[in-house]
Image: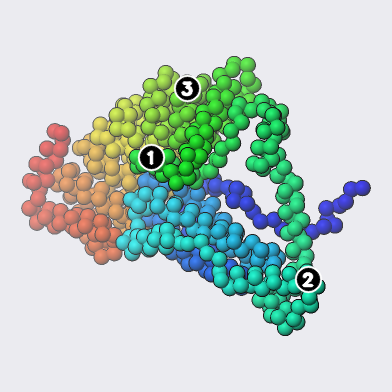
Amino acid sequence: MAVSPTIFPQRRRRPSPTSFLSPQLSTADLLRALHSLSSEISALNPPRFLFKRNSTSIIRKCCLLAVIFEEVFRQFNHRFSALFSPSSLLCFEEMFIVLQRIRALIEDCSNGGSKLWLLMQIEPISSSFHELTLDLWTLLEILPKSELNLSEDVDELRNLLIKQCREDKSFVDPSDNRLRIEVFTMLDSIKKEIVPDHSKLAELFAKLGMSDSASCREEIEWLEDEIQCQTDEKSKSETYDRTSIMLWIESGHNTCPKTGQTLVNTNLVSNRALKSLIAMWCRERRIPFGAAESSEGQNGVALNKAALEATKMTVSFLLEKLGSESQAVDMVNRVIYELRVFAKTDSDSRACIGEAGAIPLLVRYLGLDHPKLQVNAVTTILNLSILEANKARIMETDGALNGVIEVLRSGATWEAKANAAATMYSLCAVSAYRKRLGKKTRVIKGLLELAREGPTSSKRDALVAILTLAGDRETAGRLVEGGVLDMIKEVMVELPEEAMTIMETVVKKGGFVAIAAASHMIGRLVAVLRSGTDRTKESAIATLVIICRKGGAEMVAELARITTIEMTIWELMGTGTARAKRKAASLMRILRRWAAGLEGDVLEEFSMTMALQ
């Protein structure tokens, strides 16, 4: 007879570490979420009865973390988003997961649930607090200090937090341990049929927060619920937990118990995102990852090698599927999606996929026939391009670069175009490739079109790539010829900081042609000085200084015609950022010397020199 699920209340189940997922957020939203989550944890009250010291310790650390992320988010709003590397963004995602786990652990120890059950778990739960603290330390160490751009005071807080996390020791609160001993002693007495002392029993109940019969009944219900939960979880995990899988394999089975497919390999390996992130960090700093794990003994090294072999075999299996011409579109799409996820995991996976020859296979699916397939293919190439060796493979593989450029120009969706633009940005990290891409008219046109017409998130991807290309003098000139300044006018309202940063770079690198083309923007730049953000004011005043210094007396005269210009500059000298104040002072000197008739000849001579360069 079937029993309605409504007869029984839903049982309480603690989330496991793997139940927290990386957020699919933009960089700005992710930083905002990190600040919000760390602030939320900072405001939590520690549990009243158990794990008070453990919770208080980690809450204090999250208070410092909230200050740090407030500064990071504030600085991000004053900078260009391209300054965060992929490894930093992965760190932020991992940090979000760790903070979720911290909040869940504190709430688990605070809100309801069986106190006796928690008391029996004080060692593993105390260890969880310690492990999460070590995770915070690892991520703070990995995050490149230079990319955070912290002020001196906040950087000192960061160093303090790293020191506190590094020196954190796993401990069981002595008061919690004493309470556990008292409870176990009482339970032993009851088991021996010795009637406990009523006053001591009442004292124990009070320490556990059980003050009346209702709270005692609730504790019994929670305890029964926890026991049933454990039974259910054990049943649910059979053939899924490591022990059962080992028994399955050792019994002679070489197939998956769920799908029946033959296993390529029967080695069991761990697959932890944080471990992969540490490995990537070690490789980037030329630190031998195997040596870092030497304390784990030869078994740890063997597991690392086994994980790499497992990755190679998985990639080989997926590419074999992809290379088969008889596969249906849906199957091909699923395979490429798996490669896309794999390529996002770590450098080892990217290396394995690139070395196995995936890029020529992916090129086949950059066409317009299947939009989802196109998105997955170009995004996989983007993820692969993070690795230096794969950048070379993309540039050298027949049809790969042209295929990505074609997606940029006429992709089926904005997402496909945006990821093609992001691939251009990734490839531009190599100076030779940046020059090569800057010579391609289709790249410049595609990026400018996406910046004008795409949704905001796609515009940002295009602007990031444009800014990187503008760092090359020859390419800056081509961008001017392609209409980058007209594009800047169009996006200035929607994305002012990005637009102004590009304009400053183009004017600085683009030579006299760029200066002349920017002359009609002087009025707009002055308007930004009056009402822009600190970051846009910085770029606007720097751009005006360049225009006046390189453009000659004619440009200075045009600026001087704006009646409120001196008052605007004075205000910026008083309230702007340090850089904005310096640039404002320089511009004021140029205007004063021009007004006194002292600088006309000098500026004219300088502008002629620039024109000849």
Asked if 606 appears above or below 61 in the picture, the reply is: above
User: Can you see residue 111?
Assistant: no
Which secondary structure, mark 3? Answer: loop
Q: Is residue 329 left or right of residue 151?
A: right
The residue tagged 2 is: 192
- First in residue order: circle 3 vs circle 1: 1
Relative image position of residue 613 (x, y in whole percent): 15, 34
Towards the viewer: 173 or 528: 173
Q: Residue furthest right?
A: 1
The residue to which callout 1 is attached is 288
Structural crowding at the residue carrying mark 2, measured as other residues with C-alpha within 10 Å and reported as few (<14), some (14–19) or many (≥20):
few
Label 1 – label 2 distance at C-alpha: 58 Å
Q: CA distance from mark 3 to mark 1?
A: 26 Å
Of callouts 2 and 3, the N-terminal one: 2
Residue 160: x and y in percent read 38, 63
Secondary element type, mark 1: loop
In the figure, residue 371 lies in which quadrant? Answer: top right
Residue 372, picture quadrant:
top right
Query: Is 198 left, or right, of 68 in this rendering?
Result: right
Figure coloring: rainbow
Seen from the viewer's position, the closer of residues 234 and 432 is 234
Residue behind mark 3: 357
Near-viewer residue (453 or 38): 38
Q: Amino acid at mark 2?
A: Lys
| Residues under numbered marks 1 and 2 in contact, where contact means CB atoms less than 8 Å apart | no
Count neighbours of disc 3 (C-alpha within 10 A) and say few if under 14, some if 14 to 19, many if 20 or more: some
Horizontal side, residue 472 vs residue 419: left or right: left
Single out the mark in the foreground, 1 or 2.
Answer: 2
